[in-house]
Amino acid sequence: MNTDIGSTIYICAGAVVLMSNQIPQTDRCDGLDALLYSQTVASHKEPDLSKFEAWTHAGKVAMRVAGAMFLENPQVSLPVPLPESFSLVELGRKVLRHWVPDTQLAALSDQPVTALASELLCRHVSDQGRCIRIMFGVISLDLIHTMAIIGFESDEVVVGDLLHHRFNPQKVQGNISVDSYRVQLEREDYDLSRATVIALLGARRSEQIIALS
């Protein structure tokens, strides 16, 4: 738990999320459940990690179905050229700093990832370390989700800590795909979806949401 910045980092399937500690526990569960639901639906409809646009579109539709109202859906592009090397955490911060102070996002750089959380991330984010699709986000008060989705293919094999692995841009195949959105989970609308979401997720709620401490 990062009490100095008032947030806790969660691994939610293929997403790394900062959540304000001021959010009540019930709202905290709702926010993470909705995010996990959107990823689960998207991966069911498009299991191929390389189909970035189809997967992100399906995830956004699922968020709307769960009761989220879209606040922004901007197009964000990474600066070109990329540095000599980069990590997934650095790319996530680069996109999110459009809306979130970088001082708050600094916790992403320092937080160690447990073996269990690392295994969970690799299972949802990486296709044998060569095809990457990962989400970074912040869930703040009023259940506003600010999310960045990043995807690319690389010729190098990732060994060890996926989040902090240094990728070589010269081994990235094609462009790095980036998408982002801000939504607010409407409590009254989500009240109508909560039971269905919980039933559909089942054991995933305990197996695929891990708080880092």
Image: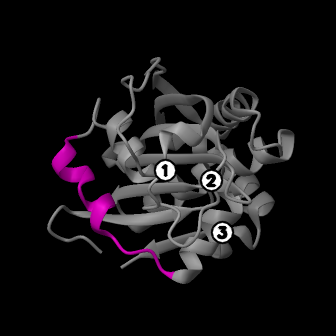
Residue at disc 3, secondary structure? helix
Looking at the image, which residue is at 74% across and 51% down?
40
Q: Reply yes or no: does residue 134 show up in magenta.
A: no
The residue mark sitting in front, 3 or 1, is 1
The type of residue carrying mark 1 is Phe
- Residue 164 spot, x, y in % from top left: 42, 61
Between the residue at mark 2 and the residue at mark 3, the CA separation in whole angstroms equals 32 Å
Looking at the image, which residue is at 61% across and 55% down?
14
Which residue is denoted by mark 3 in the rendering? Answer: 205
Q: Mark 2 or 3 closer to N-term?
A: 2
- Residue 127 spot, x, y in % from top left: 74, 55
Query: Where 174 sits versus 113, above or below?
Result: above
Crowd rating for badge 1 (residues with CA inside 10 Å; few <14, some 14–19, many 20+): many
* Labels 1 and 2 touching (C-beta < 8 A): yes
Residue at disc 2, secondary structure? loop
Please identify the quarter of the rendering in which residue 149 is found: top right
Query: Where 133 sits versus 184, above or below?
Result: below
Viewport quadrant of the C terminus: bottom left
Which residue is denoted by mark 2 in the rendering? Answer: 156
Between the residue at mark 3 and the residue at mark 1, the CA separation in whole angstroms equals 31 Å
Looking at the image, which residue is at 83% across and 39% down?
46
The image shows a total of numbered marks equal to 3
Which residue is denoted by mark 1 in the rendering? Answer: 167
**What range is drawn magenta here?**
101-114
Looking at the image, which residue is at 38% across and 48% down?
138
The type of residue carrying mark 2 is Glu
Q: Which mark is residue 82?
A: none
